């Protein structure tokens, strides 16, 4: 009488499972991209620091 097929809940559960699967995949990809963005941010900061140090060294050498 109240089986999932009779109440139409079976389709809802499949839809919910698909929705949760899609949300899980999106969150996984966002986690990977954010991790990659953090890595690239650190690389950019390191390159910026190296450029500042090289600029200071060139400035000091010109002054001498």
Image (cartoon, helix red, strand yellow):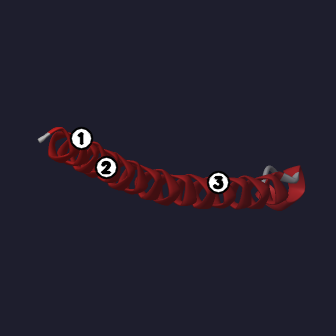
Q: Is residue 16 left or right of residue 24?
A: right
To which residue does mark 3 refer? 20
Q: Which residue is mark 1?
A: 59
Marks 1/2: CA distance? 12 Å
Q: Residue at x 21, y 44 (%)?
A: 62
Q: Residues within 10 Å of mark 2 (few under 14, many from 20)?
A: few
Residue 24 % position (x, y): 57, 56
Residue 60, percent across and down? 16, 40
Percent of width and height locating residue 64: 11, 42
Circle 1 or circle 3, nearest the eye: 1
Q: From the viewer's perspective, is residue 52 above or below residue 18?
A: above
Nearest to N terminus: mark 1 or mark 2: 2
Q: Nearer the viewer, residue 34 or 51?
A: 51
Residue at the image point whose x is 40% and y is 48% from the top? 41
Q: Nearer the viewer, residue 7 or 58?
A: 58
Which of the two discs, 1 and 3, labels the residue nearer the N terminus? 3
Q: Secondary structure at mark 1?
A: helix
Residue 27's spot in the image, x, y percent? 56, 52
Is residue 53 shown left or right of residue 42? left
Classify residue 18 as left or right of residue 38.
right
Task: State the residue lying farthest toward the front.
Answer: 64
Which secondary structure, mark 2? Answer: helix
Q: Are marks 1 and 2 in contact (CB under 8 Å)?
A: no
Q: Residue at x 46, y 52 (%)?
A: 37
Compare residues 33 and 17 and report the one nearer the observer: 33
Determine which of the numbered discs, if any, sits on residue 51 in the image: 2
Q: Is residue 29 above or below residue 46?
A: below
Sequence-first disc among 2 and 3: 3
How far apart marks 1 and 3 lie (CA) works out to: 58 Å
């Amino acid at each position: 009488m109240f089986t999932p097929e009779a109440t139409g809940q079976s389709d809802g559960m499949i839809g919910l499972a698909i929705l949760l699967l899609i949300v899980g995949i999106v969150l996984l990809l966002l986690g990977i991209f954010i991790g990659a963005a953090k890595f690239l941010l650190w690389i950019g900061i390191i390159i910026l620091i190296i450029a500042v140090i090289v600029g200071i060294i060139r400035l000091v050498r010109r002054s001498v």
